[in-house]
Amino acid sequence: MKQDHLFLGLGLAMLMGFSGAAAAAGDAGNALRGQGLYQSMCMSCHSIDYNGVGPAHKGLFGRKAGSHAEYLYSPAVKSSNIVWTDKTLDKWLTNPEKLIPGQKMGFSVPEAKDRADLIAYLKKEAGRAEKP
């Protein structure tokens, strides 16, 4: 009986260790899940490759907000000093108006997991080569 408790205790410790590792991995974002979120939440206005209602997201990371060629940004975004990073995108997706008052995106992503997954997807796609 004592041996059963030992195995149960070891099993629970291993399970807790695995769930902690899974939570840590989830914190970094899941690009595959992010792709699905992007398709369902963002594609009505955005594309990775071309400007639509919103600007193209190709090359987003490290780019100054409002600087994508051939897109007409709001004066607020164009004059901001924001550079797109994981941190600034998280703030933007949480509340665009709070980050850049006067911007024109009327959409936010309230769930932290969804934001992390969207950012992971955008980060993955930012490395793709431009189409000719």
Image (cartoon, rainbow, N blue to C red):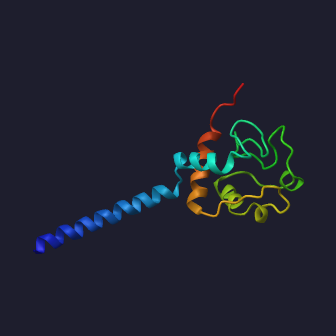
Q: Position of residue 5 (x, y in %)?
A: 17, 73
In the displayed structure, 2 sits above or below 79; it is: below
Residue at 11% in and 75% down: 2
* Horizontal relation, residue 37 to residue 77: left or right: left
Residue closest to the eye, 20 or 103: 103
Q: Tell me the quarter of the picture where residue 51 sits.
A: top right
Which residue is rendered at x = 40% and y = 59% of the image? 21
**Which residue appears farthest toward the bottom when viewing the image?**
2
Please identify the quadrant where the C terminus is shown: top right
The image quadrant that residue 116 belongs to is bottom right
Image mark count: 0
Residue in the foreground of this view, choosing between 59 and 36: 36
Q: Height in image: 109 above or below 45?
A: below
The percent position of residue 127, horizontal first and vertical second, equals: 62, 37
Question: Can you give x and y, in whole percent of width and height, for residue 81 in the image?
Answer: 81, 55
**Image location of residue 18, percent across then percent down:** 35, 60
| Residue farthest to the right, as pictured | 75
Q: Is residue 101 left or right of residue 41?
A: right
Give the side of residue 132 with respect to residue 112, left or right. Answer: right
- Asked if residue 1 lies left or right of residue 26, the reply is left
In the image, what residue occupies the spot 86% across and 60% down? Answer: 102
Where, quadrant-wise, is the N terminus in this rendering?
A: bottom left
Question: Of 78 and 54, which appears nearest the observer?
Answer: 54
Q: Extreme left residue here? A: 1
> For residue 124, which quarter of the picture?
top right
